[in-house]
Amino acid sequence: MHTMSYDAFVSGFSVDSLKQQFCADFDQGLNVCTEICDRHAGDPTRVALRYERIDGSTGEITFAELQQRAARFAGFLKAQGIGPGDRVACLLPRTPALLICVLGTLKAGAVYQPLFTAFGSGAIEYRLEQAQSKLIITNPEQWPKLADVKGLPPSMLVADSADVVAGKPDFLFEAELAKQSDSFEPVLIGADDPMLQMFTSGTTGKAKGLVVSARALMAFHMYMKYAVGLRADDKFWNVADPGWAYGLYYGIVAPLQLGATIHFNEAGFTADNTFEFLRKYAITNLAAAPTAYRLLKANDDLLKNYPEINLRVASSAGEPLNPEIVSWAQRMLNCRVCDQYGQTETGMTSANFHEFDHMHRDASMGYEIPGYRLVALDPYGKEVAPGETGELAVDMDNSPLFFFQGYMGDAKKPYKGQYYLTGDVVVSNGDGSHSYTGRDDDIIASAGYRIGPAEVESALLEHPAVIESAVVGKPDAERGAIVKAYVVLRPEYFSDEALAKELQQHVRKCLSTHSFPREIEFVAELPKTSSGKIQRFMLRKQAEDEAKQAVVG
């Protein structure tokens, strides 16, 4: 396949032509499992999943086998009276059972609810209660967390026997599936009916619940086919955990819809483990967060042990991708990494595309995905001119693929007129692309300048001593705020004053005199969410506390 011009594709794009990529008529109803699994089951040799368990055992499952297993799980759900609109929660690692639960839930027309395996009892209880979940499926390792969950719905254990856990699950996974038929008539739902029950990661306050409708399949398709550039002969691995949006939308639903083989690695992420998985399964198309690429870069001395790695393309999402990582991947992996942007609420909306020709800018989130119109707004809700900074927003009136329907409960609706507000600050490049500056509350106002932390972090990462960095504003009586950097070093470097000054000079040279970090603190690690995003709000609070103590002192 040859790449085509982005502008040419956009000019010919229509939602009607996109709908032709699906089996169902979106206006008459559809079944999501049919679209992402059953349609590919006619070829009994076509592999849907290759997996590696934490104990090192491996295996694969075809679309045809998944069709039957999903039918059995759907039959079980129907027998329990679970159907359209009902939430089925899954607290499992990346294993075949998780995929069967996803597909079986969708085949029954019910709503799949992911639960991240690092959640504690409180986070699980909150999400189950908010969603009024009808069932939770888990394994013996996660089972003890449920003991403290109030109002627990019926439970299903993925184990041969209930004797392996304290307490009594209501159902055993394999025993119940054995009672059901290999055939199940897929339940149709409307395009605007829910298929996924999601919660935002919630860096402050409680996580907000939202539903993803079946219509989102079209948006998922556009991102996966053209931005990720997933081709029929690719071996695709999305490193993100399916307990979160990126790993579920684009690690399971979207690639299966295209008939691709996906990969699950149950083991925790390490550089050695990742390099070996890339080699062993001959991965050609990779998707991961910048955190993962930074860790690989910090351990690239291991690459000499894996000469067989042959990545064709790679994609990055979740945080801004630093230009230094892009050049490193090109140099060390002979692979282009594209930065791409989205949210749980909207799916991926902006991308540097693998399958389109367009101009690439360092530190740019790229161009809007066809079917979306993205703009930057000033504080008064007006679209900014090229070269100006504003809050990234989706023009809902001119974005036919936009599927967000609002948050559950009393959560504030992020709208201003016809615009959905992302909370992210960008520079409009004037050609339909945008460059990320930071979250609205991340922007540092110092001596009259507005400084985006992303560019300072990128500059720091270009220094050979730095593995990771996070930049925040620290209150300052004279300047309003100063730039403070928290830096994680490679083990062979010493965290002393001389290196701090060297890093400051490095940023001065790369950026400007007003953007350099006036304070640098060396740390062993940065605070992150369970999905790997840096929690700058924690560092801001730490810096604010330091400033207050300095005044008191």
Image (cartoon, grey):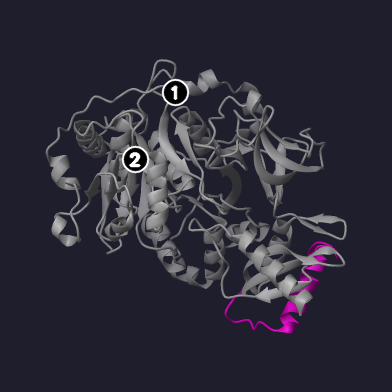
Seen from this angle, which residue lies furthest top?
28
For the residue marked with disc 1, what is the amino acid?
Ala
Residue 191's label in the rendered image is: 1
Give the structural element (helix, strand or loop) at label 1.
loop
Toward the viewer: 543 or 237?
Answer: 543
Q: x, y percentage for residue 416?
A: 69, 32
Question: Considering only order in the chain, which callout, 1 or 2, is on the residue closer to the N terminus?
Answer: 2
* Residue 242 visible in the current orientation: no
Magenta run includes residue 503: yes
Q: In this view, does 80 lie above or below 518?
A: above
Q: Is residue 469 left or right of residue 94?
A: right
Toward the viewer: 550 or 373?
Answer: 550
Q: Is residue 368 left or right of residue 250?
A: right
For the residue marked with disc 2, what is the amino acid?
Ser
Q: In this view, does 490 lie to the left or right of 195?
A: right
Q: x, y percentage for residue 185?
A: 24, 24
Toward the viewer: 538 or 398?
Answer: 538
Label pair 2/1, CB-CB below 8 angstroms: no
Seen from this angle, which residue lies furthest left?
179
Q: Specify the quadrant that holds the C terminus.
A: bottom right
Residues in magenta?
489-516
Magenta run includes residue 410: no
Which residue sits at x=42%, y=42%? Answer: 130
Q: Name the residue under label 2.
A: 133
Q: In this view, does 270 lie above or below 151?
A: below
Residue 259's label in the rendered image is: none
Separation of residues labelled 2 and 1 (CA atoms): 22 Å
